[in-house]
Every structure is written in structure tokens, then in C-alpha cells.
Amino acid sequence: MRMNLLHASLLLSVVSLAIAEATADFECPPTVSLAFTEAHHYDDVDYDPNTGSSINGSFWTDSNTMETLHLLMLQTGRSDFDGLADNSFLGRNALIPFTDWTTFTGPFIDDAGWAVLALWTMAEYKAMRHQENVDEFLAAAATVYDLIASNWDDTCGGGVWWTVDHTYKNAITNELFLTLSAQGYLRFKNDTYLENAKKAWAWIESSGMRNAQGLYNDGLVFGTCVNNGETTWTYNQGVILSGLGALYAATGNETLIHEAEITIDATILNLTSNGVLKESCDDVKLEGTPCDSDQQIFKGIWLKHLQYFLIFARSKHPELVDKYKAFITSQSEAVSRFATDPHLDIGSVWYGINEGGSIFSVQSLASGIMAHVANAEYGTCLDI
Ligand SMILES: *[C@@H]1O[C@H](CO)[C@@H](O)[C@H](O)[C@H]1NC(C)=O
Ligand SMILES: *[C@@H]1O[C@H](CO)[C@@H](O)[C@H](O)[C@H]1NC(C)=O
Ligand SMILES: *[C@@H]1O[C@H](CO)[C@@H](O)[C@H](O)[C@H]1NC(C)=O
Ligand SMILES: *[C@@H]1O[C@H](CO)[C@@H](O)[C@H](O)[C@H]1NC(C)=O
């Protein structure tokens, strides 16, 4: 469905986060090539076009993968995976008018959050590259966003619940609600989204979920509402960044940049080994239990949301790109050097050679691709 140009340009202003504008000014051929090589490997080997899903994947991790492949195409101006948005399980459900999104997204409110991010990024690609009508994608995203927002209540002073049975308030669900609300405002200029973003950040800030090291623990104890001291997963340090960056872009409040830097610097200091991100469960010898399939994608999500933070912050804070450039590059290099096998599969352990603890899955592949995509945009351009 083609639209006339006027409608198309109005629509671009609605869906665009200026990812393409922010990025088209510089492309580093070797890092872009590496990102596409791995993205094609995913598409060739792990993506099933009949179902629109990854083989051995899951809905929420697939949402992340779809978002990343479209982000890569947007930031480079390429169209290698044209048609993927409509073919994807999420996209084809957006195109069906009778999809029941409550059933579709399931009991986990955070899973719904990842779906909205994927729908917006796919819509942005379709609109920018092909001037396609993306009303269905945006309507689906709006419906899922409202579902998330309807799970906010006053228990523990605010916050959205992690699941529909309302037993746990945690960091990831609320960080997603923050980033969706702030990005939603930037995209649609709808004040409800801005109010929700401010409300979400005010609650997160006062919740006590960030510990003395500057890292977010998993969530709050049911009943007492105190920080439960549980694992500081890397993705909990990541999604907050895109939320703060987008809210900064919306309000110009410099404190938000400072708050994000606290968590970035704490992650680099405390959740790394040899200067490379390390999930606690990556160290099988220390932890005993290996990362599960969800945890295998967390480090990549950290990098993707650092990338978004830089997209939002960099026009007024170009020094932040310089500050984190080398770290971003180190992650992509470690993925190539330590985690990638001769078949181009990428394992879960990045910080050192695989001593048997690295798990090779579609989630760990997607995670590695996210490191390469962030590096292609904001890393150091190395001669190969
Ligand atoms: C999916 O998992 C099965 C069982 O572990 C395995 O045999 C198969 O190779 C996997 N397929 C892909 C594409 O990862
Ligand atoms: C703004 O967003 C809210 C929440 O999704 C929605 O109910 C409302 O209709 C939107 N307003 C406009 C003008 O689109
Ligand atoms: C800026 O953000 C900080 C941190 O959340 C907050 O305390 C402060 O009130 C905000 N300033 C304005 C003008 O909204
Ligand atoms: C993170 O900080 C805590 C508390 O300061 C410390 O016990 C732990 O060893 C640190 N972990 C890493 C990987 O640096």
C-alpha cells in the first residue's frame, strides 16, 4: 500500500526517532560488514520464514532480534532483510485486525514491552524505506502499550507489575515502561506518554532498586517493597539508559544524563572481566548454574540500549560517544575473538576463551549481533 508523498512525510515525523539521521553520517565498512555477516547468518540458519520465528527461540527474544535487524538496516541505509517485518510472527499478527493482544503477549508485562519496541522499529523501517502505511503496526503497538500502562497501581508507591497476577514489581518492566513512554512521546508528541515517562522515572528513582554501587537489582520484595538484593543483570543496567536518554531528549533535564552515566560507569566497573561484559551466570565455575536462554541475550540488550542512549544524548553531549567508544568496540572484538565459532555461531561467554561454559543458542547469537550493531554505529573504526 503506497501513500502519497505528503502523507508519507507526515508519517515519517511520527514514527522516526531520527535513528537514520543520527547515524548516516558515518559508516565504518569493516564493522558494518561484520554486523551484517552475523545478521545474515541468523536469517539463513536460525530464522524460519514459515513461522516468522526463530528456531529454538522465544517470543520476547525474537522481538529483540527483529528490533535489532531493523535498527541495523536503518542505521546503515541498507535493506538486506526487506519483507522481514511483515513476515515476522509479530508483524503478521499486527497485520491481522482480530489479534487479541492480551493473549498474544501473555502473562509477562515485560514481554509486552519488548514487542512494542520491535513494532516501532519495524514500522520506522517500513515507513522510511518504502513509505509504507504502518497504521496497523502503530495501532498494535498502542494497544500493547496501553495494556502495559493498565498494570500500574499504587502498591509500593507506583510502578507496573511484572506479570498479570500482580505479585512482583521489578526493574526491567518499569525500565521498559519508562523507555516506551519517553520514546512514545518523542515519536507521537502525545502528552500521556510524557506524563507516564516522568511518573515511571520518579517511581524508579524513589523505589530503592538501584543499589549503592549504582546498579539496579532485580526488583522489590513483595509486601515490604524493599530492594530484594537479587542479581544485577546486565539488561537491567541497559534499558534504564534508553529511558533516561529519551526522557532527556524530551525534557532537556541534565540530571538524567548524570543518572545514566552512574549506571554505565558502574556496569563497566563491576559487571566486566578483562574489560568485557560478564553476566554472573557466564562464570559457570563460580556460579554452578549456567545462564538460561533468557539470560543469554542480556549483554547484547545492554549494548543496544547504550546505543539508544547515545542516539538521544549525542547532539548535546558528543563527548559521551568519545567516552564509551572504546568500551563498545572492546565488546564487539571480544565477541569476534572469544565467542564466535568457525560456523559463525556466537556463544554466551564473551570475556575469555570458551572453557566449556559458553552456550551457543539463538539468544546468544542475537546478543552478539547487538554488540556488533552498536559497534557499527558508535565504535572505533579499526583497519582490518
Ligand atoms: C534446535 O534445537 C535442537 C535440539 O537441541 C537441535 O538439534 C537443532 O540443531 C537446533 N536448531 C537450530 C537451528 O539451532
Ligand atoms: C495518547 O495516548 C493515550 C494512551 O495510549 C491514548 O489513550 C490517547 O488516545 C492518545 N491521544 C491521542 C491524541 O492520540
Ligand atoms: C530533573 O531530574 C531530576 C532527577 O530525576 C529531578 O529530581 C528534577 O526534579 C528534574 N528537574 C526538573 C526541572 O524537572
Ligand atoms: C561488584 O561489587 C561488589 C561490591 O562492591 C563486589 O563484591 C563484587 O566483587 C564486584 N564484582 C565485580 C565483578 O567487580
Image: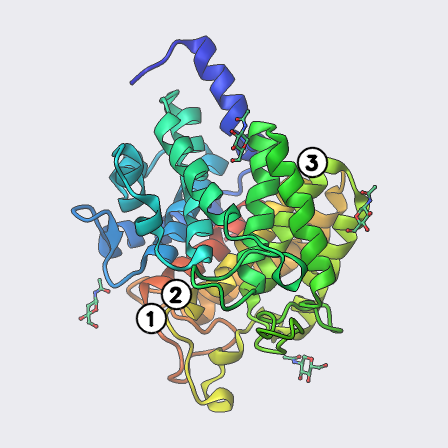
Distance of label 3 from label 1 (alpha carbons): 39 Å
Between 84 and 352, the one nearer to me in the picture: 84
Label 1 Cα crowd, 10 Å radius (few <14 / some 14-19 / many 20+): some
Residue 22 seen from this side: no
User: Is the C-beta of the residue carrying label 3 under 8 Å from the nearest atom of ligand 3?
Assistant: no
Number of the front mark, 2 or 3: 3
Q: Which amino acid type corresponds to the residue marked 2 in the rendered image?
A: Ser
Name the residue: 33% across, 71% down: 360
User: Is the C-beta of the residue carrying label 1 under 8 Å from the nearest atom of ligand 1?
Assistant: no
Q: Is residue 283 above or below residue 343?
A: below
Label 1 near label 2: C-beta < 8 Å?
yes
Number of the front mark, 3 or 1: 3
Q: Position of residue 100 (x, y in %)?
A: 30, 43
Q: Quadrant of the N terminus?
A: top left
Can you identify the residue that label 1 sits on? 360
Classify residue 315 by image quadrant.
top right
Q: Position of residue 223 (x, y in %)?
A: 60, 74
Between 157 and 294, the one nearer to me in the picture: 157
Specify the label residue 250 is tagged with.
3
Q: Secondary structure at mark 3?
A: helix
Can you identify the residue that label 2 sits on? 364
Left or right of 66? Residue 150 is right
